[in-house]
Image (tube, grey):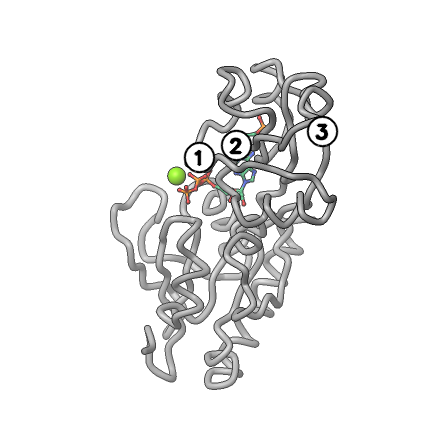
Amino acid sequence: MNGSSDDTLTLALSKGRILEDTLPVLAAAGIEPEVDPESSRKLVFETNQPGLRLLVIRASDVPTFVSYGAADIGVAGKDVLIEHGGADLYEPLDLGIARCRLMTAGLPGAMDEASHRPLRVATKYVETTRAHFARIGRQVEIVKLYGSMELAPLVGLADVIVDLVDTGNTLRANGLEPFEVIEDISARLVVNKAAQKMKHAAIEELVELFGRGASSEAA
Ligand code: PRT
Ligand code: MG
């Protein structure tokens, strides 16, 4: 199954805060969507580049679209890629945008209070959290949430959380402390492995455009 024929490329973008950072990179790379994806309700956008169309989808769905070949290439947060597993995708470029850290956090002293029993951890990153605590040899019980992880320690749902931290304002506003960095996060370009072979030239060209766009944005 393939989302686009041999001479066209389909690029999947993460909507929300990654999209906000991706659009300036696209603009710097000379890629212009037909209409502004941030204000349109469309899901598929043609661009000024013949043979390049964009999909704007939920951030956590980007690895799925790219691994099934419904998109040839995508922009996804490293947090989402780690959680997905990502073994079936190439990751040719760190765009250096939408930066943050995946961290453990909780009320002051929370780690020590739970030192004689499994630590209860609330997160939407179940696989990443399991792998992290296995690595450090700490027994955990994971509570899967879909958002507002910061609430969990405040109401006794969990001892700690695993969530993204940028400025630290959300933690501070809720009386929580950052404990340990699990991963430094930024948005990455990912490529479908079959497309990488079948559409090699077009993909190389797009990766290079993105590389130029990302570095001129960073400058
Ligand atoms: O819709 P879906 O559930 O798939 O995702 P979403 O609604 O979480 O999407 P969105 O638009 O929030 O984008 C999420 C992606 O942006 C993540 O996967 C990261 O790759 C990236 N990103 C970068 C962040 C942050 N920085 C970030 N700070 N995503 C979320 N946050 C949240 C964090 O979860 C916490 O609640 O911001 C809060 C912390 O920020 P500070 O500045 O208060 O520390
Ligand atoms: Mg969302």
Q: In the picture provided, is 194 more to the left or to the right than 188?
A: left
199 versus 166 height, above or below: below
Label 2 close to label 1 by CB (< 8 Å): yes
The dot on residue 145 is 1
Q: Which is nearer the eye, 15 or 141?
A: 141
Q: Which is nearer the eye, 16 or 124?
A: 124
Q: Position of residue 31 (x, y in %)?
A: 46, 61
Quadrant where the N terminus sits is bottom left
The dot on residue 79 is none
The Cα–Cα distance between marks 2 and 3, rounded to whole angstroms, is 14 Å
Q: Residues within 10 Å of mark 2 (few under 14, many from 20)?
A: many
Q: Residue shown at 71%/29% (left/top)?
A: 179
Identify residue for label 2.
Answer: 122
Which quadrant would residue 172 be assigned to in this image? top right
Q: Position of residue 74 (x, y in %)?
A: 47, 62
Camera-side mark, 2 or 3: 2
Q: In the picture provided, is 52 more to the left or to the right than 108?
A: left
**Amino acid type indicated by mark 2:** Ala
Q: Residue shown at 49%/15% (left/top)?
A: 155
Q: Which is nearer the eye, 177 or 52?
A: 177
SS class of the residue under badge 3? Answer: strand
Identify residue for label 3.
Answer: 179
